[in-house]
Every structure is written in structure tokens, then in C-alpha cells.
Image (tube, grey):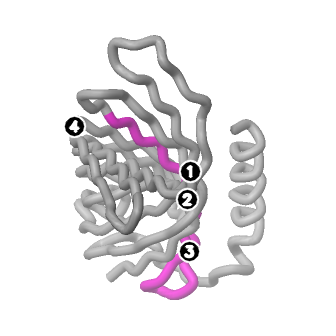
């Protein structure tokens, strides 16, 4: 986990230092709608309710989808969906959080975000040409930070980190993820 944090910090610093070379776009104010998506790596932790059973954190694929609109040039309101997934042999696990999220741009490129919504867990087991599925939903939280590098007035690269929390009937989980996204702003 520490190596992931250090790698993301180094990458963000490198992108920040090279930002003038990446984009000459002057206007990065937000005034309309936005949409984007990205992929990356996530790290899942689970604590089962009413038991002493614990698991080590596990790595897996991560993704993010975001869309919404600008309330002010530095404040966005939208829907953020963060997901983590991993397949081992015949078992696929997916943890996700969909949240109403506020994104605040502290500088023209750096943002922080937070939101409240719904967390969910899906497990699919494939066995002898059939699939058994289990789904559970509950409370979810999202927080994150990132950088926006405009390549054109309406298109940007958006590296970011997300933390999401899910409180379900059977367990509580949290996912820390690093994603590299593309976003469109108009």
C-alpha cells in the first residue's frame, strides 16, 4: 500500500511539473456539464460483522465513472461511481459505491471530492456450466483527490485517487484506488 501511495505521489508531481508542456489551455473554469471514465488499480479491505474473521487487503482492477454539472467555476456536483473487481478461478467479486459527489477545485488543476450514496457487493461463482450470484447493498461514502490536465478546452487527463467505504449487512469494506481517467467538459 505504501508503494502505491508513493508511486501515485511521484506520478502526480511529475505531471504537475510537466503541466505547462502538456497544455497551453488558459481557461480551465468549469461552467457546464462534464463526463468521464477511467481505469486503474484498487486495494480492498473487508471486516465481517459480528465475527473475528479478517482478511488481508487484496488488489484488483478499479474503475471510475463521473458525470455532472458545475455549480460554480470551482465547485461541481455530480454522480461518481467507483468500482473494484477481482476474479480468482471461478469466483468474481465486485465492490462498488455510487454517490452524489461534490468536487472542489482548490487550484485550477487540483481537486478534492466527497460524497454520500449507496455501496454494493456482488459475488458470482461459476460451477459446472451454471452461475450462482449474491448481491448486497447498503450505505456508501466516497472521498478523493486528483489533478486535471486539459489537453484542449473541452478534454482533459484526470489522474486521481479514490477511497470508498461500504457498510452492508454482512460486512464493512473499503477500497483505496488509483485511476487514470479522461474527461470531457462543456
- Residue pictured at 77% horizontal, 43% vertical: 3
For label 1, the residue is 42
Residue mark closest to the camera, 3 vs 2: 2
Assess whether mark 2 and mark 1 are in contact (beta carbons under 8 angstroms).
Answer: yes
Q: CA distance from mark 3 to mark 2?
A: 19 Å
- Residue pictured at 56% horizontal, 74% vertical: 157
Helix, strand or loop at mark 2: strand
Q: Is residue 145 left or right of residue 134?
A: right
Q: Is residue 134 left or right of residue 157?
A: left
For label 4, the residue is 138
Crowding at dot 3, Cα within 10 Å, few <14 / some 14-19 / many 20+, comes out as some
4 or 3: tag closer to the N-terminus: 4
2 or 4: tag closer to the N-terminus: 2
For label 2, the residue is 61
Tell me if residue 117 can be seen: no
3 or 2: tag closer to the N-terminus: 2
Residue 157 circle label: 3
Task: From the top left corner, tell me how far across and down residue 23 is, in percent.
Answer: 63, 81
Please state the extent of the stretch shown in magenta in the rendering.
149-166
Amino acid at each position: 500500500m505504501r508503494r502505491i501511495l508513493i508511486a501515485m505521489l511521484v506520478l502526480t508531481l511529475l505531471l504537475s511539473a510537466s503541466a505547462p508542456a502538456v497544455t497551453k489551455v488558459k481557461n480551465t473554469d468549469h461552467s457546464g456539464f462534464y463526463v468521464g471514465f477511467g481505469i486503474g488499480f484498487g486495494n480492498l479491505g473487508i471486516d465481517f460483522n459480528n465475527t473475528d474473521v479478517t482478511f488481508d487487503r487484496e488488489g484488483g482492477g478499479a474503475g471510475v465513472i463521473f458525470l455532472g454539472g458545475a455549480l460554480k467555476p470551482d465547485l461541481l456536483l455530480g454522480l461518481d461511481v467507483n468500482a473494484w473487481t477481482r476474479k480468482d478461478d471461478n469466483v468474481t467479486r465486485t465492490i462498488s459505491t455510487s454517490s452524489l459527489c461534490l468536487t472542489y477545485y482548490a487550484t485550477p488543476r487540483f481537486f478534492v471530492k466527497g460524497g454520500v450514496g449507496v455501496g454494493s457487493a456482488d459475488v458470482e461463482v461459476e460451477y459446472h456450466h451454471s452461475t450462482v450470484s449474491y448481491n448486497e447493498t447498503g450505505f456508501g461514502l466516497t472521498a478523493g483527490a486528483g489533478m486535471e490536465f486539459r489537453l484542449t478546452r473541452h478534454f482533459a487527463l484526470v489522474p486521481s485517487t479514490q477511497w470508498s467505504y461500504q457498510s452492508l449487512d454482512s460486512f464493512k469494506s473499503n477500497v483505496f484506488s488509483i485511476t487514470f481517467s479522461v474527461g470531457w467538459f462543456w
